[in-house]
Structures are given as structure tokens and as C-alpha cells.
Image (cartoon, grey):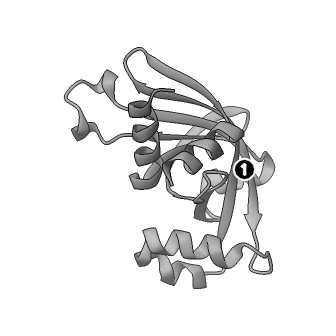
Amino acid sequence: MDTASLIKLVGLLKKQQLASLGTLRNGQPFVSMVLFAVADDFSAFYIHTSKLAFHTQDFLKNPVVSLMIMEAASANPDPQQLARISLSGTVSAVNAEDDNFGRAQLLYLTKFPQSEPLFGFTDFSLYRITPENARYVAGFGKAFNLTLASLREAARVSS
């Protein structure tokens, strides 16, 4: 991957706040919007969702999901040039007893301080999406297949 595409990828993952989460609902694709925070090494994406939400109900039944993060439409007048990444992976709960719960919660609340009261709601939980592979499009004609290892390498190079 060229340096400009790498820089764009790192910015996309660190700066964007919204993602589209794809789950399976009754055997059909279902996509919803979620807020996300990413681990410093890009090995995990954290979402904080309610058990009442369809997407949470879906991934509790089938933990295989897809997460799409896209550059803001205002960033480029040509929508086909927008940077975006589609990650495939699995979801798991991050319980308060887990060793990394505090770090994950801090990452999330640093990005979304307004969400702090929701951590007191009994129907909300913190979840980790562990990516297995991804397709990153840095712009028209610039597409890259990524693995968890290559995401981690991108995070390391950007540090």
C-alpha cells in the first residue's frame, strides 16, 4: 500500500465516529448505524449497544458481522473517491470482569463522552468486533485486501 493510502486509512479509522454494522436478521442482511472506537493497534473495534437493538439481538445469535467505515461525504465532491473500509469479523462481549474492559471503556468514552450515562443502563453492554479481513478502498482504482495482521501493521507504522 502506498504511503498516501496508508495515511488515509489511519485517519479514517481514528477520526470517523459512525459505522454501518451488518448482521443477519432472520436469515436476511440487516444494516444499522453504530458508534465505534478502535483499539490503538487496530485489532479491535468497540461498540456500546443495547440488547433491545435489532443488531445486538442479531449478533448475540450469530456473532459474524461486517462493519463499514466511510469517509464523510463532504470530504470529496466525487462520492466514488471517498475512502472506505469494510471489515468482516466476529463480535464478543467485553464484560466488566475482563482484563481489557477498563481500557476499552476509556477508548470509547474518550471518543464519546456523552455516552457515559449509558454505561449505567443494564441493557447496554460493550462489545468487541475482532476483524478477520477487510477490503479498503482509498479512492477510485485504489483497493486493498487487508488481514488483521496488515491492520496491526498499519497501526504500528502510523505511530
Farthest residue to the left: give it: 77
**At which x and y percent is residue 50?**
61, 66
Give whichever of 1, 45 is nearer the camera. 1
Q: Residue at x 46, y 74 (%)?
A: 110
Q: Name the secondary structure under disc 1.
A: helix
Query: In the image, is residue 80 above or below residue 148?
Result: above
Examine the image and state in which quarter residue 38 appears: bottom right
Examine the image and state in which quarter residue 133 appears: top right
Q: Residue at x 32, y 24 (%)?
A: 81
Q: Is residue 5 left or right of residue 122?
A: left
Give whichever of 52, 3 is nearer the camera. 3
**At which x and y percent is residue 29?**
63, 33
Q: Which residue is mark 1?
A: 59
Q: Residues within 10 Å of mark 1 (few under 14, many from 20)?
A: some
Query: In the image, is residue 92 above or below residue 69?
Result: below
Examine the image and state in which quarter residue 22 appears: top right
**At which x and y percent is residue 119?**
58, 80
Q: Is residue 57 left or right of residue 85?
A: right
Q: Residue at x 66, y 80 (%)?
A: 122
Q: Is there any visible trace of residue 24 in the rendered image?
A: no
**At which x and y percent is residue 105?**
60, 74
Q: Is residue 151 left or right of residue 143?
A: right
The kind of residue tagged 1 is: Phe
Query: In the image, is residue 149 above or below residue 109?
Result: above
Give whichever of 56, 131 is nearer the camera. 131
Q: Is residue 122 left or right of residue 12?
A: right
